[in-house]
Structures are given as structure tokens and as C-alpha cells.
Image (cartoon, coloured by chain):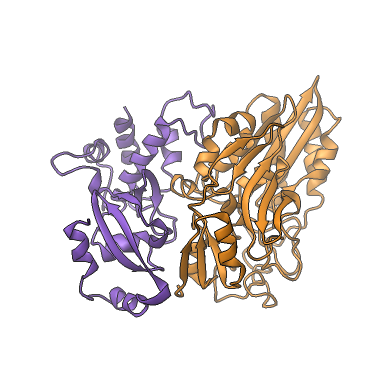
Amino acid sequence: MMPFEYHRAVSVTDALTAVADRPDAAFLAGGTNLVDHMKLGIVAPGLLVDVGHLPLTEVHVLSDGTVSVGAEVRNSDLAAHPVVRSTYPVLTRALLSGASGQLRNVATTGGNLLQRTRCVYFQDLTTPCNKRTPGSGCSAIGGYTRYHAILGASEHCVAVHPSDMAVAMAALDAVVVYLDANGEHRQPLSTFYRPTDDRPDRDTVLPHGALITAVDIPPPPEHARSTYRKVRDRASYAFALTSVAAELVVADGTVTGARVALGGVAHQPWRARVAERTLIGGPATEDAFRAAADAELGLARPLPGNEFKVELTSRAVVATLVSLVEGRQ
Amino acid sequence: MFSSAALKITHRAISNPMDIADAQTMSGLHATEITVRVDGAEYRVRVDNRVTVLDLLREHLGVTAPKKGCDHGQCGACTVLLDGRRATTCLALAVAHDGAAIVTATGLGALDALHPVARAFLDHDGFQCGYCTPGQICSAVGMLDEFKAGFPSHVSVDLDLSGELDGTEIRERMSGNLCRCAAYPNIVAAIEEAAR
């Protein structure tokens, strides 16, 4: 690890000011991803501005029902929050399926959104990687692809976003609230992550020095049920091969509302809008769910070695929706 | 203001390679003076900003209960109670935990007054080589607190947690602690007993 300066921010303004004039500065929150990457040599910030002690640790329910989650709310606290548990089971379940108890106690809401891919080539400095060094090439293409994308990838990068929390938030139409020198901005999570163009090193649209302060989650529709299903190589404490965040509203056997997002399959939480359009207005049956899942997965472009993720994802979508109809969430 | 242990540590002689490496950057902008409370004793020490809480404990303060396994947050051997909650110390920068209260497996009890979780690990033979054990015990203590506070888990059928802490729940909640000897059945049995 390279030497670095450290500054514990005493306010949001202090944090923004400290980073603004330093291109080599990075924000530190829980550190569970950043410190690891500093050890590995993937990043070497010259200044860490610690925002982990800022008073952004509350979950507020706004007058319109929006749940506003402070950026420094720890993953374990967010998962256990009574309002989140009762209003967004999909979010609690997604959070609880990620990492370990120790890491969830430390990892923050903002940091979870900004965590980097677990692509093994990204983490291995001896291999080319466009996400680490744009223009150097992608070692995953033609390599080990079990944990790589089947949707939305390009010849530049086939890495996936590793978050579970963000998948649930994508299904819930969450909005990322951030501050920079120009004031407060609101970025829908659906457009928060950048496409896989020739700068895959830039994961998100956040400019340098922008600080996430909250994530706003609008209230769910009436009578909605939601849950999260994660498929992985171990029963616990492993990243997703594929995952499904789903919310369903069913009236008299007909789907009247559906929001579905997929994890572990793309560079960002993949909002399955084709599946949603297919579902809405149709019967709440396994056959209809299968048709909707297959319609979405028709967009898939798997890599040699991860073709199985297409069928796996389709089945995971069906199983998730069936469980919601059966009353589990 | 500070304990004698702190003064001893602050002025410890350079005696190992890590200290020598630290000494080169201990001045200027790359080091910070911090205070931590470890197992009830307060320490004031100047650390290189790169030093993790784990290395602070083991290499600077001589507190060797937390173990270095993977050093990447994957094995749980370095787990302590950090401000009352279980956390891996290998991914925590010491400088970011100025003012923290740390309890290691050593600080949970005494040899003649073992913590109930430590007692249960002995009674159930919840270890073989013992390397992961201090982390397992700290993690179990933190986990039991989380359960009592009503934190659900990935395997909880009911998110309002009306169920009991059975083997399935314990295995899920303890999945952040690996045991290379695979003493898992006895670890689960020990925690089940400690939870009663």
C-alpha cells in the first residue's frame, strides 16, 4: 500500500472541500472494499477523506412515504430497520444475502453502491484489464467467465456489478442523492451506472468529489409483495451467479404491477423491463412467468463458459415470482 | 491521563521490520496520533495511516488474540468487537478508528472466569488447531447480540424473527468465519448451547 494522507471530515461541506482540489483524493466510508483494493494495489489514493463519521446514519420516512436512507447507514442496520423490513422485504433480503455479518456491520449504503467488480482479472495486477487500465484489454474475454456478464457487456468489459443491495434498490426505483460543488443532485439508480463503453474504469456517472448523502426509495404500490432470490456456488457468503429482485402486484389472478431487477449478470443491476412489460396484464401463472423471463433473457449474449447463466437466470426469475404468488416474501 | 501501558507502547524501540518501515513515514502527513481502548486499557499511539486495526493490535500493541488469516476480509480470523459490534479488523484502518473501543477474545473474560461462549467452545471441543477460535468466539458473541436485538438473517423465514436460533440460523450467521480444520459441527453445537 502506498502512503497516504488522512482527513476525518467533520461535516459534509468539509468533506466536499477536502476532496475538491485533490484529483488523487478518495472518500473512505466503511472501507471494506476500498482498503482491500489499496492493499491489492488496484487504487492508490494520496488522500483519504473519511466520511464514515458524518451524521448520515438515519433512515427517514418522508411525508410522501419515501424512505430516505442516509449514505452512512450500515448494511446490517438497514436490513434490520423495521420500516425496511415491513415495506421493502426485497431490500432486507438482498442486504442479508450479501457478504458476512462482520462486513455488513461496517459496509455503508453509499459504499455498497460504489463497490467495484469482483472480476478476478480486475483484482489481479498481472493481467490486462480495461476497468483498471483503459485500453489495456479484457482478460475475461476468452478467460474464466463463470462470474461474468450475460447482459449489457461489450468488447471492452464483461465484468458484473457485485452488489445485492443495489439490485433491490433498482427494482424499487431508488434515487441516489449526492452533493458536489454545484449543489444537490438526484440521479435515478437506473442511470447511475455507466454503460460498458471504452471507459469501463468509470463505473458511475458521479463526478470526482461528489458525495452520496442518501438513497431515496419511493413507497411501493398497494398490495405489493417483494422478495430477493440469490443463486451462488456456496449456501452463504458468496457473490451471486445470478440473483433476482422482484415485486409483484396481483389482483384476481392478473398481474397488475411488476418490477424485476437481476444481479450478477451485468455491469449494473439489470432492470428487466422486457419481462415487466410481458408480465403486466397477464395471468399470474408459472407459464406466464416463464414466458416473461425468457423474453428478457432473449437479450442475453453469454460468453463461452457462462451460457448456463441464461437458463439459470430465467428459472430464478420464475421461482422468485412463483414464491411471491404463494405468499412468501 | 493515559495508562502506563500506553506510554510503554508509544516509546517502544524499533525492533521489527514493520516498525522500521513505519518509522520512515511516521513523521509528516502520512501518520496520525490516535487513541484506542483495547480490552479495557487505553493506548495513545502514533500510527502510519496504512496500519490496519489488526496490525495495530498485533504488531504495535502486542494484542495477539485476533489472528491474521486472509488479510482480505474473507476468513473472519481477525474478528473483534469494534465499538460493540463484530467486525473484521484487517479491512479497518486504525486511523479511521481513533477513539474506538475494541474487545478481543482476550477481553471477553478471564481464565478463571471464561465468557459463556468461550466455555461452550471448550465444552463442545469447538476447535482443532485453534487459529480461527478467537475470531469465532468474538463473532459468536456479536452474533448473539444481533439475534437478541432482532436482526433477521438470510435464512429467516419471517423477517420479524419469531423463530429461534437453530443450527440453520447459526450456520448462516457465522458464515463469515472459516475454520480450515472444519470443526463446524462442534462450533454450531457450542453456540447453540451458549444461546440457551
Looking at the image, which residue is at 59% across and 64% down? A17
Name the image quarter holding residue B168: top left
Q: Residue A148's spot in the image, x, y percent?
A: 66, 59
Q: Please state if A10 lies on the left or on the right of A143 as rendered.
A: left
Looking at the image, which residue is at 75% across and 46% down? A271
Residue A327 sits above or below residue A288 on the image: above
Q: Colour of chain A?
A: orange
Front in this rendered view, residue A34 or A153: A34
Q: Which quadrant would the C terminus of chain A be assigned to in this image?
A: top right
Q: Residue B67's spot in the image, x, y percent?
A: 31, 57
Residue A275 sits above or below residue B27 on the image: above
Q: Which chain did the renderer colour purple?
A: B
Residue A38 sits above or below residue B82 on the image: below
Front in this rendered view, residue A118 or A298: A118
Q: Which quadrant would the N terminus of chain A be assigned to in this image?
A: bottom left
Q: Residue A160's spot in the image, x, y percent?
A: 66, 58
Q: Residue A303's spot in the image, x, y percent?
A: 72, 61
